[in-house]
Image: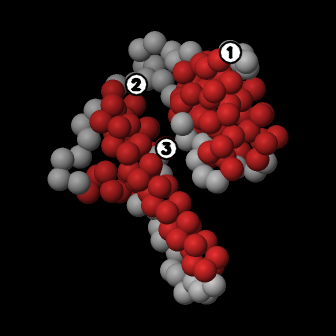
Amino acid sequence: MREATVEEQVFWILSHVQGGSADVWKENVMEELESGEIEYETVEELLMTLRKEFGGGEEELVKVVELRKLEQEGRTVEEFVQEFKRGMNGEIRRKLMEVDNPPASIEQWYRKATALDRNWRESRREEERMREKKKAVGGAPKQEQRQSLP
């Protein structure tokens, strides 16, 4: 398995930058990258830029970088997939294991986990937009229970 280039890693990380002003910032950065206005020599440069721009959230970014560095090395594919699954959000992992046809390959785990994660995040953004819309109209939002991941 070939190692991902810095450019591929940067775009992968940017694909997970979501919500509010982060969406606008991400789009601007992606346009600048594609036009050649900026270039990151290392993934750490991007992470430093993210920290300066938004502060906090380092824990999730560190996990993303660690996941990108995950390699099979001398392990069997089964051991490798198990480590990938252990590093995943527990709720996503549970949902994937409870489906009728659970993922069998690392690629299936990645695709299905990514889809669940994106759907959950989009749902949360939509709920937030609805709460903000209610506030703007003057209706006080009802006390809602915190929803767990997916």
Are there few (<14), some (14-19), or many (20+) residues within 10 Å of tag 3? Answer: some
Instruction: Look at the numbered discs 2 and 3 and tell me whether their residues touch, using CB distance below 8 Å.
Output: no
Q: Tell me the number on the disc at residue 75.
A: 2
Residue count near mark 1 (Cα–Cα under 10 Å), binned few <14, some 14–19, many ≥20 = few
Amino acid type of the residue tagged 2 in the rendering: Arg
Q: Quadrant location of the N terminus?
A: top left
Q: Is residue 38 above or below residue 26?
A: above
Distance, label 1 to label 2, CA atoms, is 39 Å
Q: Position of residue 114 (x, y in %)?
A: 41, 43
Looking at this view, name the residue that lies furthest to the right: 52
Examine the image and state in which quarter residue 24 appears.
Answer: top right
Query: From the viewer's perspective, is 120 left or right of 139?
Result: left
Which numbered disc covers residue 104?
none
Mark 2 element type:
loop
Q: How far apart are marks 3 and 1 (CA)?
A: 34 Å
| Circle 3 SS class | helix
Coordinates of residue 92 in the picture (x, y in percent): 40, 53
Number of numbered labels in the structure image: 3
Above or below, comparing residue 105 to residue 34 in the picture: below
The scheme the figure's colours follow is: secondary structure
Between disc 1 and disc 2, whose residue precedes? 1
Residue under the image location 72 percent in, 34 percent down: 47
Residue 30 falls in which quadrant of the image?
Answer: top right
The type of residue carrying mark 1 is Gly
Location of mark 1 (residue): 36
Q: Is residue 53 visible?
A: yes
Identify the residue under disc 3: 87
Query: Residue 73 location, x and y as percent?
Result: 46, 19
For badge 3, the amino acid type reads Gly
